[in-house]
Amino acid sequence: MAVTKNLTVDQGSTYVHNFTVQESNGDATDLTNYSARLQVRRSYDNSNVILEATNVNNKINVDASNGILRLTLLPADTSNIGFTGANLEAVYDLEIESIAGVVTRLIEGSFTIDREVTR
């Protein structure tokens, strides 16, 4: 079962967040040979992805031996997302996939983008 972690990102700013993956005894999970992906959508039912981060597009760095997935969003990743109002309320989840094709959803939650004024 995925853990819930709500995220808030300032539009047009660099954002870095470390997700630590641990075994039940507290030891870091070895993420060797795992890929990672995160998608943000306006709602669970919405088919449009408004933001995608993976280890392939270098927005997620997998620190395999320490069990850390480091999400890094650059200003350009959020500055062109269009919305009205003070912020965008969306949802996301983060999955890992083993080399054998086993997919595990680790984390999910709300993903809020606070609108920037300075451009």
Image: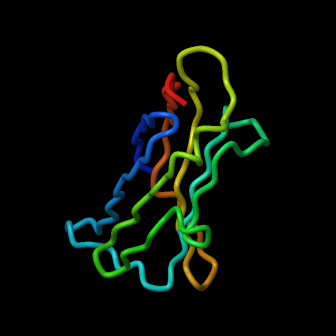
- For residue 67, which quarter of the picture? bottom left
Looking at the image, the residue that sits furthest to the right is 47
Image position of 26 (left or right of 46): left
Tell me the residue at 38%/52% (across/down): 16
Image position of 20 (left or right of 14): left
Q: How many marks?
A: 0
- In the picture shown, does residue 90 fall above or below 26? above
Residue 43 visible within the image? no
- For residue 35, which quarter of the picture? bottom right
- In the picture shown, does residue 91 fall above or below 74? above
Looking at the image, the residue that sits furthest to the top is 85
Question: Horizontal and vertical percent for residue 17?
Answer: 37, 52
Q: Quadrant of the C terminus?
A: top right
Image position of 41 (left or right of 5): right
Tell me the residue at 34%/67% (across/down): 68
- For residue 61, which quarter of the picture? bottom left
Tell me the residue at 52%/31% (across/down): 113
Question: Horizontal and vertical percent for residue 77?
Answer: 59, 48
Looking at the image, the residue that sits furthest to the left is 26
Residue 24 visible within the image? yes
- In the picture shown, does residue 81 fall above or below 34? above
Tell me the residue at 57%/55% (across/down): 38
Question: Horizontal and vertical percent for residue 32?
Answer: 43, 84
Q: Nearer the viewer, residue 84 or 64?
A: 84
Question: Horizontal and vertical percent for residue 60?
Answer: 49, 64
Check the image and tell me how it is coloured: rainbow
